[in-house]
Image: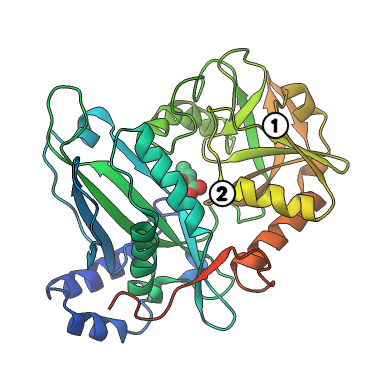
């Protein structure tokens, strides 16, 4: 990830944002802010670092209460109790979504209903009040609309949308927080991995650490699933790898997922991907790619995928909201490196990437109803 490269963009935006924050956002101010020209971002330098934007969405709810529609606030720090459940006990979940600028200069988002569903399921797993689908989808449109100037030019990247649901109420003994915050912030992004979107990644198989275990929270996008992978990921990066493949915790034999994405193996016209058995993330890009591949005549099998199958595959790729479809250049296991497609992108990964991004960016017809238009001034 290119995290520190964007301090220039961030610095400019911080100054712009500070000026905007000086005014309380009112309908009138929003209209004025709306008229600003696109912020000075060097789109060609965009990676997956945070670029602060104009505003964010916030709603609050108590454990016994009902969620009410929240509102747009200037982007900035939030204040929470040191005893907030999310800080002490990790009671929090998040989502990853994207909005795109189409060739017609419209702003669209991809399968927000699926994120709403997963977010509600995750809330249930973490004993938090689920955000109703209509409030979630309304919030997503509001925050995109309020930050539409930050959606990169067509084909350059996307606006990454990060919904959070966190236990912000204070609690000392272990138990669910008395109150919750539903917050969405956004950031323009481009390629997740170094080297550009379709640059093949080099993965190493991890055998000592596991990402999730049966009965745990592997299939929930909870905050606590992500920091435990850092130790292994950082070591892998030090050794020159892009990321890590995790194996199942029971037999240490089957592929689970990469730290931030799902995994696919191609052999002829068959594509296999680990089944959703509670330990891996039910990716929305994963689900979409399975459907697109079947439409293109591939047999797609959701089942256990052994490491042996990976090492004899024609091609492998990973999918995720952040990573999109990324080719796997090599997999290293116990010091032995297996290279796929001469280290270049494979034909199947390329085709599926083109199909998916074509639909997402409004370049291909959306016959599946996956695209949601975000009206201008939706936030007013
Ligand atoms: C996403 O793909 O949207 C994620 O949330 C993964 C995250 C580690 C960047």
Specify whether 107 is left or right of 165: right
Question: Which quarter shows the C terminus?
Answer: bottom left
Query: Residue 260 at what x, y percent from top left?
Result: 52, 40
Specify whether 375 is left or right of 339: left
Which residue lies under the disc numbered 1? 331
Question: Circle 2 — which element?
Answer: helix
Query: Residue 361 at what x, y percent from top left?
Result: 60, 70
Query: How busy is the neighbourhood of tag 1: few (under 14 within 10 Å), some, or many (20 plus)?
Result: many
Answer yes or no: disc 2 within 8 Å of ligand 1.
no
Specify whether 348 is left or right of 213: right
Residue shown at 65% from the left, 37% from the top? 263
Question: Compared with residue 96, is residue 275 higher up or lower down, i.e. above or below?
Answer: above
Question: Compared with residue 251, is residue 49 higher up or lower down, i.e. above or below?
Answer: below
Residue shown at 54% from the left, 15% from the top? 208
Answer yes or no: disc 1 within 8 Å of ligand 1.
no
Q: Furthest residue to the right?
A: 268
Which residue lies under the disc numbered 2? 284
Asked if marks 1 and 2 touch (Cβ < 8 Å), the reply is: no
Query: Residue 190 at what x, y percent from top left?
Result: 52, 60
Residue shown at 34% from the left, 63% from the top? 139
N-terminal-most mark, 1 or 2: 2
Q: Nearer the viewer, mark 1 or mark 2?
A: 2
Residue shown at 26% from the left, 81% from the top? 33
- Res 62 quadrant in image: top left
Q: CA distance from mark 1 to mark 2?
A: 24 Å
Instruction: Please say whether residue 191 is visible from this viewpoint.
Output: yes
Query: Residue 316 at what x, y percent from top left?
Result: 74, 40
- Along the line of sight, which residue is nearer the eye, 133 or 188? 133
Query: How busy is the neighbourhood of tag 2: few (under 14 within 10 Å), some, or many (20 plus)?
Result: many
The mark found on residue 92 in the picture is none
Question: Circle 1 — which element?
Answer: strand
Instruction: Please say whether residue 41 is visible from this viewpoint.
Output: no
């Amino acid at each position: 990830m290119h995290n520190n490269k964007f301090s220039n963009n961030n610095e400019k935006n911080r100054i712009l944002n500070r000026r905007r924050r000086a005014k309380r956002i009112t309908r009138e101010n929003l209209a004025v802010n709306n008229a600003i020209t696109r912020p000075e971002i060097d789109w060609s330098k965009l990676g997956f670092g945070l670029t602060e934007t104009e505003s964010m969405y916030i709603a609050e709810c108590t454990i016994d209460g009902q969620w009410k529609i929240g509102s747009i606030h200037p982007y900035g720090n939030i204040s929470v109790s040191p005893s907030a459940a999310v800080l002490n006990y990790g009671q929090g979940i998040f989502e990853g979504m994207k909005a795109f600028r189409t060739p017609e200069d419209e702003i669209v988002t991809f399968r927000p209903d699926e994120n709403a569903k997963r977010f509600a399921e995750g809330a249930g797993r973490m004993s938090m009040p689920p955000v109703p689908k209509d409030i979630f989808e309304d919030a997503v449109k509001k925050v995109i609309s309020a930050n539409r100037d930050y959606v990169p030019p067509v084909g350059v990247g996307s606006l990454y949308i990060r919904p959070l649901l966190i236990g912000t109420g204070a609690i000392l003994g272990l138990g669910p927080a008395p109150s919750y915050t539903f917050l969405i912030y956004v950031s323009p992004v481009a390629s997740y991995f170094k080297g550009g979107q379709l640059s093949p990644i080099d993965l190493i198989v991890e055998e000592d650490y596991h990402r999730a275990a049966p009965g745990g929270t592997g299939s929930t996008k909870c905050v606590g699933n992500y920091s435990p992978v850092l130790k292994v990921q950082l070591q892998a990066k030090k050794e020159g790898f892009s990321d890590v493949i995790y194996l199942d915790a029971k037999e240490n034999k089957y592929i689970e997922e990469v730290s931030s994405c799902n995994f696919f193996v191609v052999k002829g016209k068959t594509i296999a991907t680990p089944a959703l058995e509670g330990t891996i993330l039910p990716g929305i890009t994963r689900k979409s790619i399975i459907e697109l591949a079947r439409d293109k005549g591939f047999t797609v099998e959701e089942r256990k995928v052994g490491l042996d199958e990976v090492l004899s595959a024609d091609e492998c790729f990973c999918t995720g909201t952040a990573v999109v479809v990324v080719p796997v250049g090599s997999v290293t296991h116990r010091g032995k490196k297996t290279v796929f497609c001469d280290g270049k992108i494979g034909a199947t990964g390329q085709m599926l990437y083109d199909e998916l991004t074509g639909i997402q960016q409004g370049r291909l017809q959306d016959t599946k109803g996956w695209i949601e238009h975000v009206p201008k001034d939706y936030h007013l």
